[in-house]
Image (cartoon, grey):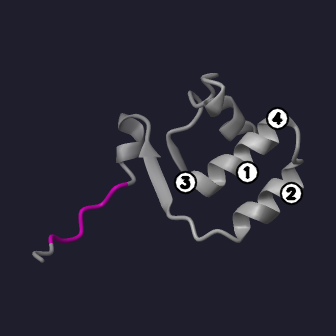
Amino acid sequence: MEFITNNRKKRKNDDNWDIIIGPVANDNTMLVITLYIRGDYDENEVIKRLLTQKLKDQVVFKNENSLRYLKFEEVLEV
């Protein structure tokens, strides 16, 4: 939650990471995060509320070093 809060408050805090993986926020998650930042929810309450949501994960490759973990497997035509 500290990482998310720092991002929402535009505090840069991701320089120590090559890869960042986490759920994509939607309207419901933003409400919960806002209530946490405001102090209405503690971290346990936020986690309890976010775990019930079916969120998709996103992956951010922050630098060239992180790209070495990628491996091309195939191309599918649909």
Circle 4: is it few (<14), some (14-19), or many (20+) Cα within 10 Å?
few
Q: Tell me the CA gap for discs 2 and 1.
A: 9 Å
Which residue is identified by label 2?
45
**Image height check: is 52 above or below 42?**
below
Residue beneath disc 4: 38
Of the image marks 4 and 3, the number of the one nearer the N terminus: 3
Residue 46, position in %: x, y? 80, 54
Task: Tell us which disc is closer to us: 2 or 1.
Answer: 1
User: What's under tag 2, amino acid-wise?
Assistant: Glu
Q: Residue at x 40, y 34 (%)?
A: 63
Q: Are marks 4 and 1 in contact (CB under 8 Å)?
A: no
Residue behind mark 1? 32
Magenta stretch: residue 73 in it?
yes
Q: Quadrant of residue 16?
A: top right
Closer to the chain start, of discs 1 and 3, is 3
Question: Could you tell me if the residues under marks 2 and 1 are in contact, i.e. CB atoms within 8 Å?
Answer: no
User: Where is residue 72 drawn, in percent x and y?
Assistant: 24, 62
Question: Quick one: quadrant of the C terminus?
Answer: bottom left
Taking the spot 73% from the left edge, 51% from the top edge, the residue there is: 32
**Highlighted range, magenta:** 70-75
Sooner in the amino-acid sequence: mark 2 or mark 4: 4
**Residue 37 location in percent, x, y?**
78, 36
10 Å neighbourhood of mark 2: few (<14), some, or many (≥20)? few
Mark 1: give few (<14), some (14-19) or many (20+) Cα within 10 Å: some
Residue identifier under label 3: 26
Q: Residue at x 34, y 55 (%)?
A: 70
Which one is in front, 72 or 56? 56
Most frequent secondary structure within the magenta stretch: loop
Q: Amino acid at mark 1?
A: Val
What is the distance, in whole Å, between disc 3 and disc 2 at their CAs? Answer: 18 Å
